[in-house]
Amino acid sequence: MLAWGREKTAVALEDAQFSLGQGPGPNAVTDGAPVLEPDLALAEAVARYPAFTPAAANLRVRAVFAFPLRIGAISVGVLTAHRTVPGPLTVAQLADALALADAVTVLLLHQDPRRSQANGASRKQPRPGLTQPATHRAQVHQATGMISVQLGVSLAEALVRLRARAYARTDSSTTSPMTWWLGDCASTHQTPDHPEPPPPCSRASGEHTWRCAA
Amino acid sequence: MTREEQLYEAFVEAADTLVDDFDVIDFLHTLAERCVHLLGVDAAGLMLADQHGTLHATAASSENARLLELFELQTDAGPCLDAFHTGTAVVNADLRANHERWPRFAEAAEANGFIAVHALPLRLRDTVIGALNLLSAGPLSDADTRAGQALADVATIGILAQRNIHQAELLTIQLQTALHSRVTIEQAKGMLAERLQISVDEAFNLLRQHARSRNLRLSDLARDVALGSTAAIQPVSGT
C-alpha cells in the first residue's frame, strides 16, 4: 500500500516496482538492508533488474536508493528515493536517509490505519514521547518478543503496546521511561498490567511504501 | 591448545568471513568467547557504532543480561566511547579511579566484581567503527594487550566481511545491517524465553545450538523464529 508519495514520478516508479515485483525497493525488503543503485544504466543494474530498468528509464530516473523500514524482524515497508541524474549519495546524505527511515518506521508503527479504524481515530498521531526513535536497548526487544507470545500478537503490535504503556506509566522527568517496567516484565515472564485484548485483525508486514524525491 | 594455536585459529576463522553463509553476529560471539580464553579476562564485549555515532552492544562473551547492561551503559560515557572517539586503546583503567570519568559505568562494573577495564578500538584505516571491551579482576599484560588488539582487528575484518568495503557507504550499510540482526536476535530470544519459560540467556544458547547443529545462520534462524516461520525449537537436554 502506498502511504505517501510526493510527486508523479515517485508514484509511477513505485507502481513499476510493485507491478513488476522487481527493483531496489522489493530487494531492500527481501534483504532487510538498504539497496543503493547510483546508476541504473550500468550493465550490473540492468542485469539485476531487467524489467525494472527500462521502466525507470522511461520515467527519466537514473538513480534509486531504497531503505527498509525495520526494527529487527519488524518490517513496515520501504523508503525509496530517486534522482534523475546518476551518482551516489554522499556519506552525509546516506546518514540522513537512514535517520529518516528510522523516524518514519516509528511513525508508521504507531499509525497503522487498521488499528486506527478498530480503535477509533485516537491513534492518528503518536502521543508525545512516542515519536522518539525506537531504542536499541536489548531488553526492549526481548520484552517485545515476550509480549507478542503472551498476547498472541505480531512483534509490531507488541512493540507499539510496550512503548505506549511504558510512556503512559512514567512521567517525563524519568530519564529511562521503560526501565522499571521492563525489569518486571522480563524477569517474571509476566505482563505486569494486562493490556487490552488483541485487535480484530493482525498486521501483515511490508505493506507500506514510502517514497520521496531526492 | 597453546595460546599461539588458539590465536591462529581465531585468524583462520576470520578468513571464513568471505564465505556466503557467514553470520557476523555469531562470528563476533565466538570472538568474544576467545578473548576471554586467550587474554585471561572475565568478560568481553563488542560495541558497534551506528550512523549517528551511537554505540550498541553487538556481541558478548556470555549472553548475560547484566553483562549486556554494562556494555549498554557506555553509550553515554565509558571506556568504549573513549576508545571510539579517540581511536586509541584504553588499557588497565582502574574502575575505582574513574568514578568521575564514567560515573554510571564504573559503579555498575564494580558492583559486578570487575576491577580493571580495557577498550580497544575497532579500526579500519582512518575510521573507527566500534570498540572491543574487556573486563577483568586484574591488569592486562603488554602481550595480552597486543593479542587483544589483534583480535579487535580480526573482529573488524569479520564485520566488514565484504571485499569492496573501502566505500564508506557500504561500511555504513554493513554496520546498520549488523545492528538490525542483533535486534532480531533479541526479539527471537524474548519469544523463545516466553514460549519455553526459560531465561533470555538460555534462549540465546538454544538458538545458537540449534543454528549450529542444523548449519543455519544464526541471524536467519532468529528471523524465522521472530516471524513464526520455523518449526518449534525445543530445549536441549543437558544445557
Image (cartoon, rainbow, N blue to C red):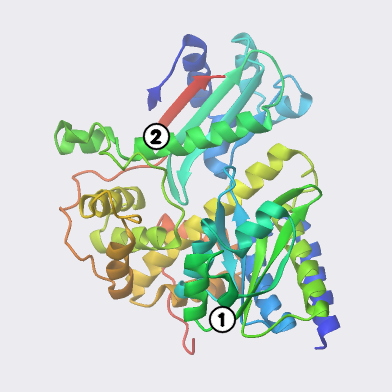
Query: What numbered label is drawn on residue A141?
Result: none
- Examine the rendered structure and indicate whether residue A93 appears above or below residue B76: above
Q: Residues within 10 Å of mark 2 (few under 14, many from 20)?
A: some
Write down the quadrant of residue A145 in the picture: bottom left
Query: Residue placed at 59% from the left, 10% from the top?
Result: A59
Cα distance between the residues tagged 2 and 1: 48 Å
- Do pointers 2 and 1 mark residues of a single chain? no
Q: What element does badge 1 sit on?
A: loop
Q: Chain of mark 2?
A: A
Query: Residue placed at 67% from the left, 80% from the top?
Result: B36
Q: What element does badge 2 sit on?
A: loop
Q: Position of residue B177 (x, y in %)?
A: 59, 48
Type of amino acid under label 1? Phe
Type of amino acid under label 2? Glu
* Residue position marked by numbered label 1 in the rendering: B114
Q: How many marks?
A: 2
Q: Is residue A207 left or right of residue B208?
A: left
* Residue position marked by numbered label 2 in the rendering: A207
Q: Is residue B231 visible?
A: no
Write down the quadrant of residue B4 in the picture: bottom right
Q: Which dot, 2 or 1, sits closer to the camera?
A: 1
Residue nearest the viewer, comparing B190 with B195: B190
Q: Is residue B73 visible?
A: yes
Quarter of the rendering occupied by the N terminus of chain B: bottom right
Residue nearest the viewer, comparing B215 with A172: A172
Query: Residue placed at 39% from the left, 42% from the top?
Result: A205
Q: Residues within 10 Å of mark 1 (few under 14, many from 20)?
A: many
